[in-house]
Amino acid sequence: MDKIIIDGGQRLEGEVTISGAKNAALPIMAATLLAPGVFHLGNVPSLADVRTMGHVLRVLGAAVEHHDHSMTIDTTNARYHEAPYELVKTMRASVCVLGPTLARLGRARVSLPGGCAWGPRPVDFHIRAMKELGARVEIEHGYIVASTEGLRGTTMHFDTSSVGATENAMMAATLADGATVIENAAREPEIGALAEFLRAMGADVRGDGTGTVVVEGGHELHPADVEIIPDRIETGTFMVAIAMTGGDVLIRGAKLDHATAVAMKLRETGAQVSEEDGGLRVRGPVWPRAVNVTTAPYPGFPTDMQAQFMALMSIADGSSVITETIYADRFSHVPELKRLGAQIGLDRNIAVITGVRKLSGAKVMATDLRASAALILAGLVAEGETEVSRVYHIDRGYEAIEKKLAALGARITRLKQ
Ligand code: EPU
């Protein structure tokens, strides 16, 4: 298993280019199952999770080729309906093939994803959405087994905003008979990106970006080409890294309107964030001020940036409170940040961080993608050497993070093992 070694203390300077968004690419790849033919996807990030979704599509009968950042998916022979446990357990986002497979083939057998590193992450909303569209759904031998003679449009309401369930419902509804209204739909930019792609395929989807998405079903769908939007969480991660190191970097391809909540919080810490031709410029403060953060669905502060922001607060001037409202247990970075000298108290879903002037390098590891990113950021400012193991978590969601940081002046290398 590879390790990342960081010798802390370098200021980040220069330019970095943001890759395509993992969480936009995955549902768009699944959506290709809705129509037979050849699709071309551009700006596809080279990530372990994207490769896993490629395997899931192949198991369903599609042909998938991914070179550099271009992907071709041929769904002409996508006639199988089972996404097996061996794949789904490695990436829960595989469950987004449920809606398109059921809608196109009339049946789907998708493994339940099981637990996650930070506690239970149920898929009950996904299942309910398929039932509301008229499908029969049973849980059998660890699998969601769904079938239908034809989905019917309906009005559905999610109790909690869910990105994945909104995506599954939208995709299934495109082939349903009549209109589907999804109330309390998620508003994340990845929903907008999927809606845009479905429209390019010939679907009638409206209201994305608001809490009510309307899909007028039954239009004939056809293949389409798409460029994946830039990754707002990778953007946010670099923004925090720059702020932590007092750096000055142009983040090419980054979109401020997708990262407003993070930008506003960073400005409160004293960082400067401004739009420039081609991206976002971030200039870090000499010493960041402590600010409080509460995670919330978009456009609130993303849970996927909570760990990285905690790394920043670990070296801030003063005390801050970080409240996690999406995943109450998403704190595997806390004990590891403490090993680097951070002072953090954790009470259920609330962390109180007392900033320290210096972190000190140590061997650390994390069991979650964003937690691993937070440890790398902490390593950038820690005195001496930090060794982050279990790097495969990072490779799920960050393309060549060590190369991008090294190009900005960080002393960071990957130790292949
Ligand atoms: N929820 C349920 N039942 C469901 C679905 C969700 O109770 O059937 C709850 C969840 O437990 C959570 C809340 O609803 O408390 C929101 O979860 P959501 O369904 O929105 O999450 P997701 O679609 O499974 C996506 C991202 C995650 C990100 C969350 C929240 C993808 C592939 N994944 O997951 O990204 O944390 O939205 O924004 O889009 C990551 O990239 O590191 C990552 C984990």
Image (tube, rainbow, N blue to C red):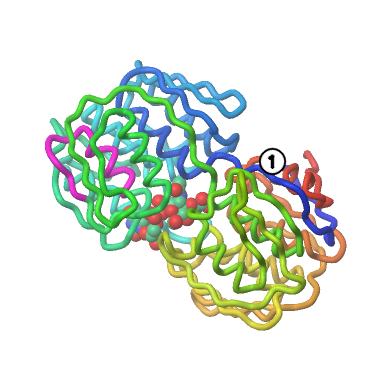
Q: What residue range appears in magenta?
A: 166-181
Q: Is residue 5 above or below residue 101?
A: below
Q: Residue at x 30, y 24 (%)?
A: 35
Q: Is residue 170 magenta?
A: yes
Mark 1 nearby-residue class (10 Å; few <14, some 14–19, many ≥20): some
Q: Is residue 229 above or below residue 209?
A: above
Q: Is residue 171 above or below residue 337?
A: above
* Residue found at the very far front of the displayed protein: 277
| Amino acid type shown at disc 1 | Ala
Q: Residue at x 42, y 49 (%)?
A: 189
Q: Which of these two is toward me, 129 or 322? A: 322
Residue indicated by mark 1 = 400
Q: Which of these two is toward me, 121 or 30? A: 30
Q: Is residue 312 above or below residue 153?
A: below
Left or right? Give the position of 360 relative to 159: right
**Tag 1's secondary structure?**
loop
Q: Residue 55: give x, y in percent of width and height.
A: 48, 29
